[in-house]
Image (cartoon, rainbow, N blue to C red):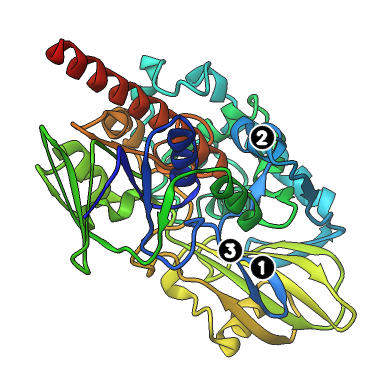
């Protein structure tokens, strides 16, 4: 049995950040990870002859936590591709033009849709401050778009755009999540869109994750699939599926919301936490990398919202091939190993491409995630967020699912990890004071 001050379960960006902060603060810290790697729902891997981001990717200077971490370790941002051509589907027909034209078509509808972002989130990093939020937290994004009464072509295009952002179905998506994203980008939807898909980490997400880990004195234990957690007045005991036990005074659960109920926790987490975990998140779609024949023009494409793939962009252009990154709203509709299926999906969005190879990772089927990036269902903010952020005895949750600011991004994970580490450090200090007072 290993003993430490703190156990952190999950070595994504939240867990890594919390482990660094606590260990550098002098607290013995053990970081347990079920996988054979760190970095959680980000995963840089060599596929199709390139290092490809199979999960989270994008960063931006409007995201203060990840930008500060990159600055801390001297890691720069690199711009993504600039597009010259665009395809989109509306009214049952395929259209093509330049990329600027597509953004112009999305501009006025998005301005209307997101006009109230700063009204409902005047302090974006304090998302629950405004009581008026309760008036709209039950509204789906689908309903909010339909209320705009747009011409059908604009309506379809806007719905496809937000299906991409949510990586899921709009009839389950919270309108408040769209407003949150815009609010943290100063209420400017184009700045929000730039933050979502314009700059990457030089060297990839793995480089930043490894830099945080290297700056930590925490003890990392990979391939440790936790089966149960038990807490009492004396501390916390963690037992793995292999029967190994770890004990500590405090514990941080840095896991995706959708897997929390897979753990046996005694006493059980609150009904609110368990209900939120049972619902999970709306991000349940697919990310697929596709290599096609020939040197293609730098293009971006929006397809029908219900398509297996509804978004495609030319990411890497080589002499004889082009590598595309694609997204769809339903992971079950996309096989990340099926070349023939990828060809059919692409044919419905972008004509004339020949698929050579495909790859990806099914995050929804992955037992350690069961979701892609965290995107909220209706009611999440007002019904669950405060409860999920509330410590439960010696246990605290951390991760992008529980962030106040850029929830759904690496930035939100780092923010949440910092918050959890600060709270745990305070709890440990208070324990020491209480022990000293009793001893005295």
x, y (%) of residue 222? 40, 63
Q: CA distance from mark 3 to mark 2?
A: 21 Å
User: Which label was assigned to residue 287?
Assistant: none
Give whichever of 410, 168 is nearer the camera.
410
Answer above or below: position of 433 versus 339.
above
x, y (%) of residue 288? 59, 71
- 432 sits left or right of 112 in the view: left
Q: Earlier in the sequence, mark 3 or mark 2?
A: 2
- Viewer-nearest of discs 2 and 1: 1
Q: Earlier in the sequence, mark 2 or mark 1?
A: 1
Q: Which residue is mark 3?
A: 304
Q: CA distance from mark 1 to mark 3?
A: 26 Å
Give whichever of 364, 254 is nearer the camera.
254
Answer above or below: position of 280 versus 50.
above
| Quarter that holds the N terminus | bottom left
- Viewer-nearest of discs 1 and 3: 1
Answer above or below: position of 87 versus 403.
below
- Residue at (75% x, 52% y) in the render: 202
Judge the density around disc 2: few (<14), some (14-19), many (≥20) Cα neighbours within 10 Å.
many
x, y (%) of residue 159? 55, 51
Q: Which residue is mark 1?
A: 52
Instruction: Indicate the secondary structure of the residue bearing disc 1.
Output: strand
Name the residue at the front extreme: 440
In the figure, residue 343 lies in which quadrant?
bottom right
- Viewer-nearest of discs 3 and 2: 2
Q: Which residue is mark 2?
A: 189
């Amino acid at each position: 049995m290993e003993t430490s001050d703190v156990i952190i379960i999950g070595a994504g960006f939240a867990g890594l950040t919390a482990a660094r902060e606590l260990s550098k603060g002098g607290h013995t810290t053990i970081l347990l990870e079920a996988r054979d790697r760190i970095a959680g729902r980000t995963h840089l891997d060599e596929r199709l002859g390139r290092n490809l981001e199979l999960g989270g990717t994008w960063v931006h200077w409007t995201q203060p936590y990840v930008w500060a971490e990159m600055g801390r370790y001297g890691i720069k941002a690199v711009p993504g591709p600039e597009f010259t051509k665009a395809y989109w589907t509306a009214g049952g027909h395929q259209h093509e033009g330049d990329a600027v034209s597509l953004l112009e078509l999305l501009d006025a509808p998005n301005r209307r849709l997101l006009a109230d972002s700063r009204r409902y989130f005047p302090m974006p990093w304090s998302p629950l401050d405004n009581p008026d939020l309760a008036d709209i937290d039950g509204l789906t994004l689908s309903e909010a778009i339909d209320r705009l009464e747009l011409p059908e072509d604009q309506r379809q295009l806007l719905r496809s755009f937000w299906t991409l952002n949510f990586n899921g179905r709009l009839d389950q998506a919270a309108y408040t999540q769209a407003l949150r994203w815009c609010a943290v980008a100063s209420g400017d939807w184009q700045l929000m869109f730039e933050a979502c898909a314009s700059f990457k980490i030089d060297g990839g997400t793995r480089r930043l994750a490894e830099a945080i880990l290297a700056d930590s004195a925490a003890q990392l234990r990979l391939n440790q699939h936790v089966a149960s957690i038990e807490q009492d007045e004396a501390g916390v005991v963690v037992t793995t599926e292999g029967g190994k036990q770890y004990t500590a005074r405090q514990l941080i659960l840095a896991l995706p919301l959708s897997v929390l109920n897979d753990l046996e926790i005694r006493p059980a987490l609150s009904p609110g936490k368990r209900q939120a975990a049972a619902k999970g998140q709306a991000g349940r779609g697919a990310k697929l990398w596709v290599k096609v024949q020939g040197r293609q023009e730098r293009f971006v494409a929006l397809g029908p919202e219900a398509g297996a793939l509804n978004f495609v962009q030319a990411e890497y252009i080589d002499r004889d091939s082009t590598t595309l990154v694609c997204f769809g709203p339903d992971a079950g509709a996309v096989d990340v190993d099926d070349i023939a299926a990828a060809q059919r999906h692409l044919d419905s969005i972008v004509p004339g491409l020949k698929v050579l190879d495909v790859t990806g990772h099914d995050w929804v089927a992955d037992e350690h995630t069961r979701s892609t990036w965290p995107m909220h269902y209706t009611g999440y903010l007002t019904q669950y967020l405060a409860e999920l952020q509330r410590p439960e005895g010696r246990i605290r949750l951390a991760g992008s699912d529980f962030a106040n600011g850029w929830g759904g991004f690496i930035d939100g994970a780092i923010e949440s990890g910092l918050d959890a580490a600060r709270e745990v450090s305070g709890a440990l200090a208070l324990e020491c004071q209480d022990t000293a007072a009793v001893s005295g």
